[in-house]
């Protein structure tokens, strides 16, 4: 049976940020030059989870569905998701390229990022990749780092920005607004009594949650999109002593019943840090100021 040949790139591509996009766009150009379709080979779950390398500390920027969708949106012909296993982690760079990529997926060449490594313990840098490709008659190309504002973009840097509440820089490096998706669940409904009803969000994945505080956001529901609102992340210490982190969004000029619905919030701007209030009136006054800030 005939299998179409592909020029490929490989990586975990968490967040599919602007640095990843640069590699994928270069891959597309190479595919056009060589008259071959292109594919992105990625992995799931994250290697740290499989190898038990402090998996509890790992919070990702994208789900597998989001990652696949963003790669496809960049015009890549095919996305191959390889299950990451301990057996795969033990492969040498040559084994991975030949046995996994060439024999299973008919990869005719590789276009990889400047710091990309493959194989056991990430021992295969570009020199090892190029050596294997030349040995087996495969195309090989290295993409130079993508630099924005004199900084090389990385998923790690984006995670750091989000954990510090630096949404502007995180979104700039991502190339799009960071988002969280979940289901609207019942809360204590305190916000409704003070004129600020909120949708309590129960996340659908273990994506990274940005720093506690209030954010300007855009909201997408099943049948409504790009609604404006403000999101709270925090422990609600003014009214709750459970210690649990809450994620609540107040959608402006909106009063529909959306319990049980899927909801996505896109972070636009950090408004303020979390605060503890002495009373409900003080909280209401601050929320009124927050809304004015977000709307202006």
Image (cartoon, rainbow, N blue to C red):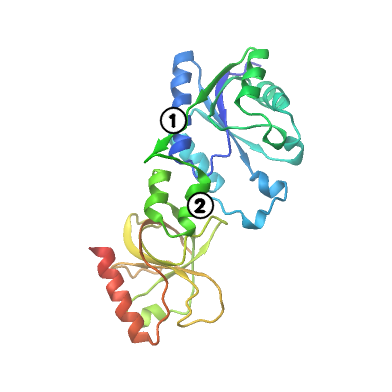
Rendered view: 135 above or below 21: above
Which residue is labeled 2 in the image?
159
Q: Which corner quadrant of the image does residue 199 belong to?
A: bottom left
Furthest residue in direction front, as rendered: 150
Q: Is residue 31 left or right of residue 294?
A: right
Q: In the rendering, at what x and y percent does residue 166 appear? A: 41, 56
Residue 255 visible: yes
Secondary-structure class at tag 1:
loop
| Residue 220 disc label | none
Question: Could you classify mark 2 by the number of other residues whose Cα lies within 10 Å: few (under 14), some (14-19), or many (20 or more)?
Answer: many
Q: Residues within 10 Å of mark 1 (few under 14, many from 20)?
A: few
Residue extending farthest to the left is: 296
**In the rendered view of the protein, which quadrant contains the C terminus?**
bottom left
Mark count: 2
The x and y percentages for residue 253 are: 28, 68
Where is residue 48? Give x, y as percent: 67, 47
Q: Quadrant of residue 97?
A: top right
Which residue appears at 30% of the width and 70% of the height?
A: 290
* Disc 1 versus disc 2: nearer the observer: 2
**In this orientation, which residue lies closer to the viewer: 260 or 58?**
58
Give the CA distance from mark 1 to mark 2.
26 Å
Mark 2 or mark 1, which is nearer the start of the sequence?
1
Q: Residue at x 46, y 59 (%)?
A: 164
> In terms of depth relative to the viewer, which is nearer, 72 or 257?
72
Residue beneath label 1, please? Answer: 75
Q: Quadrant of residue 46?
A: top right
Relative to 29, is 113 above or below? below
Residue in the image at 63% along x and 20% along y: 106
Residue at image x 44%, y 30%?
A: 75
- Callout 1 touching callout 2 (CB < 8 Å): no
């Amino acid at each position: 049976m005939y299998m179409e040949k592909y020029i490929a790139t490989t990586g975990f591509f968490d967040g599919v940020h602007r640095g990843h996009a640069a590699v994928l766009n270069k891959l597309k150009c190479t595919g056009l030059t060589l008259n071959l379709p292109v594919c992105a080979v990625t992995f799931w779950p994250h290697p740290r989870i499989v190898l038990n390398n402090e998996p509890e500390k790992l919070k990702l920027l994208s789900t597998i569905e989001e990652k696949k969708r963003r790669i496809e949106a960049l015009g890549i012909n095919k996305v191959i998701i390889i299950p990451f296993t301990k057996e795969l982690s033990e492969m040498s760079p040559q084994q991975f390229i030949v046995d996994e990529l060439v024999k299973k997926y008919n990869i005719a060449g590789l276009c990889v990022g400047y710091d990309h490594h493959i194989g056991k313990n990430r021992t295969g840098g570009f020199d090892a990749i190029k050596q294997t490709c030349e040995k087996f008659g495969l195309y090989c190309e290295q993409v130079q780092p993508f630099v924005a504002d004199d900084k090389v973009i990385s998923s790690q840097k984006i995670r750091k920005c989000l954990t510090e509440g630096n949404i502007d820089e995180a979104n700039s490096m991502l190339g799009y607004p960071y988002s969280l998706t979940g289901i609207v669940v019942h809360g204590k409904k305190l916000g409704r009594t003070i004129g600020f009803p909120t949708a309590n969000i129960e996340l659908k994945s273990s994506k990274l949650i940005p720093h506690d505080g209030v954010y300007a956001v855009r909201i997408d529901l099943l049948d409504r999109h790009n609604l404006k609102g403000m999101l709270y992340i925090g422990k609600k210490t003014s009214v709750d002593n459970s210690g649990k982190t809450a994620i609540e969004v107040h959608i402006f000029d909106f009063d529909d019943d959306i319990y049980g619905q899927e909801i996505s919030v896109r972070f636009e701007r950090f408004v303020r840090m979390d605060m503890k209030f002495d009373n409900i009136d003080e909280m209401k006054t601050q929320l009124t100021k927050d809304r004015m800030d977000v709307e202006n």
